[in-house]
Image (spheres, coloured by chain):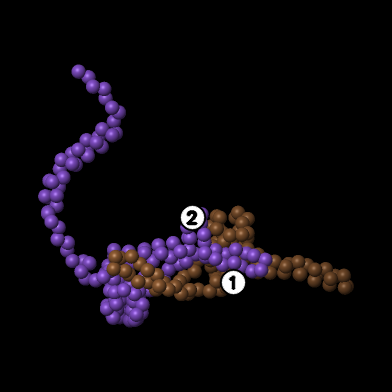
Chain colours: A purple, B brown
Amino acid sequence: MRLLCLECGNYTYFTSEVQVYRSVKPDPEGLIIDDVLMEDFNYSDSNVRDELRDNVDYLLKQGAEAMYFDTSSGQTENSLISCARCESKRITPPYSEWAPKHNPMSLEQELMEHKEEFKQFRKEKHYANHLPVLWQP
Amino acid sequence: MQITCPSCGNHKDFLISLWVRATFKINEDGTLSILHTKQLESIEEKLTDQGKTSFALTCQECSADAKITFNEYEKINKNSNELSALEGL
């Protein structure tokens, strides 16, 4: 479950408004409206998919911050995604998304465990920025 | 109808953006499947509105706002009408 409608409990079907680009080609018989085809991909198709993914990802990332209080309805809504079943705009990520993660070890333990690896990395970084020095007895 | 780009002179390929309402499904693995799209704007209205209140049609080559002439023969007709009127006099 990624998103949840607070009105009807739907967590599968949603709607969102996105922009689609269409190609317009003037022709002696009229205008030819078609998909925008680039060399190796369909720009019209990929643009719809990308914008939809962006809207969903934004709502998942922002959570409650993407919601605003609508004075006319007196409810907290979001402007990007609405429920396909009941058309409500009260869509949020479910509460479980915000539950604190239980990590197997503390941050300090993790840092100590990777201490040697980091030292090695720092050496690599240092030597990568310098020219090699010939060995001298 | 004649469409031209005032910037680069292109008269073949143009782009128009339209708002659509997409109905989609969130799958178990988090991917999205698009079920339906409904066009919310009319292409005809956007084209006739071009240059009056907004610019929706852009050049595909240089992204400049395109210029639409709905009746390119209007000027020729006007000139010929004036000419025939003068001849009549």
Quarter of the figure with residue B26: bottom left
A87 vs A64: above or below: below
Q: Amino acid at mark 2?
A: Asp
- Please state which of residues A118 and A41 is positioned toward the viewer in this rendering: A41
- Relative image position of residue A11 (x, y in whole percent): 29, 74
Give the residue displayed 19% in from the left and 42% down from the top: A118
Chain ID of residue with mark 1: B
The answer to whether residue A126 is visible is: yes
Give the residue displayed 87% in from the left and 70% down from the top: B87
Cα separation between marks 1 and 2: 32 Å
- Relative image position of residue B61 (x, y in whole percent): 56, 55
- Please state which of residues A114 and B30 is positioned toward the viewer in this rendering: B30
A129 vs A135: above or below: below
Give the residue displayed 18% in from the left and 66% down from the top: A99
Residue that mark 2 sits on = A40
Q: Amino acid at mark 1?
A: Thr
Residue that mark 1 sits on = B48
- Please state which of residues B68 and A30 is positioned toward the viewer in this rendering: A30
- Relative image position of residue B21 (x, y in whole percent): 43, 73
**Residue contact between numbered discs 1 and 2, judged by CB atoms under 8 Å:** no
Chain ID of residue with mark 2: A
Under circle 1, the secondary element is helix
Q: Quadrant of the N terminus of chain A?
A: bottom left
Structural crowding at the residue carrying mark 1, measured as other residues with C-alpha within 10 Å and reported as few (<14), some (14–19) or many (≥20): some
- Relative image position of residue B64 (x, y in whole percent): 55, 58
